[in-house]
Image (spheres, rainbow, N blue to C red):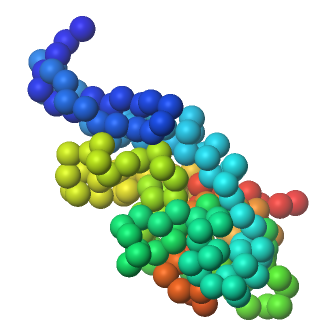
Amino acid sequence: MLFATGLAVALSLSGCKLVKTESADASAADPIATLVSESFEAKLLPALSEKAVDLLALRDALKSGLDSTGSQYGLRVGGAGGGWNFAVKGRGKVIVENRVSKAAVAEVDLDGDGTADVILQLGPVVKGTALRDVTPLYDFSAFRDQIEYARLGRALNDRAVSTIPADKPLNGKTVDFLGATVLRSAGEKPLVTPVRIEVMP
């Protein structure tokens, strides 16, 4: 086995950690890419499926306040000033689809009133780090610095939207989705980074 100075990925039952190792191959695999490859489907997707709250139920719960709802369903990163990250799921009709922008989105009506209740990010440009922050899998203390941690957030976003077909229109279709969002106020319209979008027959 070849060794050189670099980072290697160590995944444990309690989470994911980057540790230093030795390697003689300067072209060794990017540790962030390796971490995403090894954890996305094996750990993150099951965690999202297990924790996901229906967005309509989340909306009702938010009427009692963001912090109380977050304590019940979400995870906060960065202390009291940070937003609450939620694993979410839902089903609704796409009423607006904008793929002109690189930050493409689909707006979805969940309750049938003709207005959008949630925005799904389609990429390739994705905002936020909800996928990274919605579970305890990726602990900041396990990473070299903030730059490495930010790279992980982007890599998870890229992996998520890579599964969304760019050539299949969603407008007017009923979709079932699973993903993550961060909320900083109870009345904020959720901007969801989806890990799955299924068009219903």
Q: Residue at x 16, y 20 (%)?
A: 23
Taking the image as shown, residue 171 lies to the left or right of residue 191, namely right
Q: Relative to the observer, which residue lies in front, 78 or 27?
A: 78
**The quarter of the displayed image where residue 143 is located:** top left
- On-image quarter of the C terminus: bottom right
Query: Is any atom of residue 158 visible in this view?
Result: no
Q: Residue at x 38, y 70 (%)?
A: 79
Q: Residue at x 36, y 29 (%)?
A: 10
**Residue 12, image x and y in percent?**
44, 30
**Residue 127, image x and y in percent?**
42, 71
Taking the image as shown, residue 82 lies to the left or right of residue 181, namely left
Q: Residue at x 25, y 32 (%)?
A: 19
Position of 78 relative to 118 (above/below): above
Position of 173 relative to 114 (above/below): above
User: Which residue extends farthest right?
Assistant: 201
Taking the image as shown, residue 22 lies to the left or right of residue 159, namely left
**The quarter of the displayed image where residue 165 is located:** bottom right
- On-image quarter of the N terminus: top left
**Residue 48, image x and y in percent?**
62, 52
**Residue 75, image x and y in percent?**
52, 63
